[in-house]
Amino acid sequence: MAANNPPHTFRRSSGPPTSTQPSSSPARTRSGRTINQYLALAFGLAYLGAGVLGFLVTGFDNFFGRNTEEFLLGLEINPAHNVVHLVIGVLGLALWWTHSGARTYGAILFLAYAGAFVYGLFAVDNTDINFLSMNSADNWFHLGSALFGLVIAVLPARRR
């Protein structure tokens, strides 16, 4: 029957694969996207939204203001802080399209927000260096963001 099936055509299998070897590809949803990708998208959208809403609170004046007393959900912000949120959000939207891009975004989040957390340990009570107008709540939120980025970056690819 090989004469009926030229070598360049493939027959569709009607059942599950017969191999018991797990696939090395990441776990994918029905759309073909991985959980890492959806987490990167959600985080990117959240930070993009925070950046836009932040400008509604702060406006564009006093760009590097310290101790602005302007808050978004309890987190102190200034326009420079809003720009950081916009950049993180845009990066998420740019990198979520592929699994490797989402993992790269997670690594960037981890490194950037771990650095922001360490910076905040010194900057929160020091108006001389607190050019992002951060408070203690910001600092803990940055630690959480760093850990979330780590999850996106290293979330294991489950095998089917």
Image (spheres, rainbow, N blue to C red):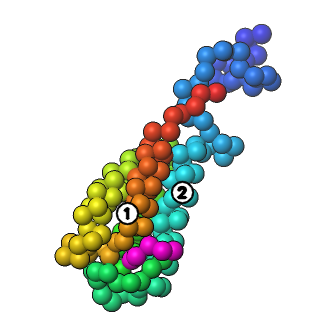
Q: CA distance from mark 2 to mark 1?
A: 23 Å
Q: Which residue is mark 1?
A: 139
Is label 1 in a helix, a strand or a loop? helix
Query: Residue 116 is drawn in which quadrant?
Result: bottom left
Q: Residue furthest right?
A: 14
Whole-percent x and y of residue 102?
A: 47, 48
Residue shown at 37% from the left, 63% from the top: 139
Q: Residue furthest front?
A: 125
Residue 46 among magenta residues: no
Q: Please provide the residue range marked out in magenta.
A: 73-77
In this view, the residue in front, 96 or 107, is 107
Whole-percent x and y of residue 3?
A: 73, 12
Q: Is residue 118 above or below residue 71?
A: above
Q: Which mark is residue 56?
A: none
Query: Residue 68 is drawn in which quadrant?
Result: bottom left
Q: Which mark is residue 41?
A: 2
How would you rate the neighbour count of disc 1 (Cα within 10 Å): few for under 14, some for 14-19, many for 20 or more?
many
Q: Is residue 129 visible?
A: yes
Q: Quadrant of the C terminus?
A: top right
